[in-house]
């Protein structure tokens, strides 16, 4: 296929357009926020669509694309500014409301989109989709990834991975795996 590099050695995947940090806060996430000695402030907070949380006394706190420790430091700073003396705040991620996804299409038993939990390989993704059908062309599976240079497609020999002749490859959120039909 034109545009798919043929590989004779180990497959080198292009880097994604952005590499999201798995612990960064996203819209819809549920956070547990504890302010030591302040039960009325402590509780569960959901990150709004604009990426902030509404916190007692201090109002909107930006959370989007920040790690929980940075959000805690921001809340501590704002609470120390006239509200509490030496506040101690901890923030932890309770639940991902909008998990990142990968898509598996073609000759798999259950094509569709599946959550990417932060660590996922091509074989695990195919397994999430119910495995390959008997019509799958295992030697020409395509991994499609958005990169900073545009969409890139890499051809992967899944049969070589199954037979331990090649290494299973990590996939990134947003990747598309296309399993073509065998010509025979």
Image (cartoon, helix red, strand yellow):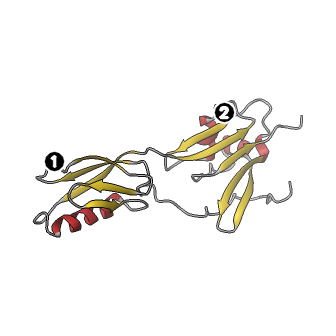
Q: Quadrant of the C terminus?
A: top right
In primary-sequence order, the first of circles 1 and 2 is: 1
Task: Name the residue at 74% across, 56% down.
Answer: 153
Q: Which disc number belongs to residue 174? A: none
Task: Name the residue at 14% across, 54% down.
Answer: 36
Picture coordinates of residue 118 (x, y %)?
49, 50
Name the side, left or right, on which 146 lies relative to 90. right
Picture coordinates of residue 31 (x, y %)?
32, 49
- Farthest residue, direction right: 184
User: How packed is label 1: few (under 14 Cα within 10 Å), some, or many (20 or more)?
Assistant: few
Q: Nearer the viewer, residue 101 or 138?
A: 101
Q: Quadrant of the N terminus?
A: bottom right
User: Are dots 1 and 2 in contact, CB under 8 Å?
Assistant: no
Q: Which quadrant would residue 63 be assigned to in this image? A: bottom left
Q: Which quadrant would residue 81 be assigned to in this image? A: bottom left
Picture coordinates of residue 72 (x, y %)?
27, 60
Name the side, left or right, on which 155 lies relative to 91. right
Q: Tell me the SS state at disc 2.
A: loop
Residue 146 vs 104, above or below: the answer is below
Q: Nearer the viewer, residue 33 or 163?
A: 33
Q: Nearer the viewer, residue 106 or 42?
A: 42
Q: Is residue 136 visible?
A: yes
Q: Tell me the SS state at disc 1.
A: loop
Q: Which quadrant would residue 105 be assigned to in this image? A: top right
- Reading the image, the residue beneath label 1 is 40
Residue 102 vs 133, above or below: the answer is below
Q: Is residue 163 visible?
A: no
Picture coordinates of residue 29 (x, y %)?
40, 48
User: How packed is label 2: few (under 14 Cα within 10 Å), some, or many (20 or more)?
Assistant: some
Name the side, left or right, on which 49 lies relative to 161. left
Name the side, left or right, on which 179 lies relative to 25. right
- Reading the image, the residue beneath label 2 is 131
């Amino acid at each position: 296929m034109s545009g798919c590099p043929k590989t004779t050695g180990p497959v080198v995947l292009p880097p994604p357009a952005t590499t999201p940090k798995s612990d960064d806060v996203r819209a819809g996430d549920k956070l547990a926020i504890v302010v030591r000695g302040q039960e009325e402030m402590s509780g569960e907070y959901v990150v709004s669509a604009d990426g902030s949380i509404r916190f007692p006394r201090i109002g909107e706190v930006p959370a989007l694309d920040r790690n929980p420790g940075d959000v805690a430091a921001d809340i501590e700073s704002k609470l120390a500014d006239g509200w509490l003396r030496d506040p101690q705040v901890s923030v932890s991620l309770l639940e991902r409301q909008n998990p990142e996804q990968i898509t598996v299409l073609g000759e798999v038993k259950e094509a569709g989109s599946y959550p990417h939990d932060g660590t996922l390989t091509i074989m695990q993704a195919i397994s999430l989709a119910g495995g390959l059908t008997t019509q799958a062309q295992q030697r020409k599976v395509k991994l499609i990834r958005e990169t900073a240079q545009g969409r890139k497609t890499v051809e992967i020999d899944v049969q070589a991975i199954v037979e331990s002749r090649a290494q299973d490859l990590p996939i990134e959120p947003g990747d598309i795996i296309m399993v073509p039909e065998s010509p025979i």
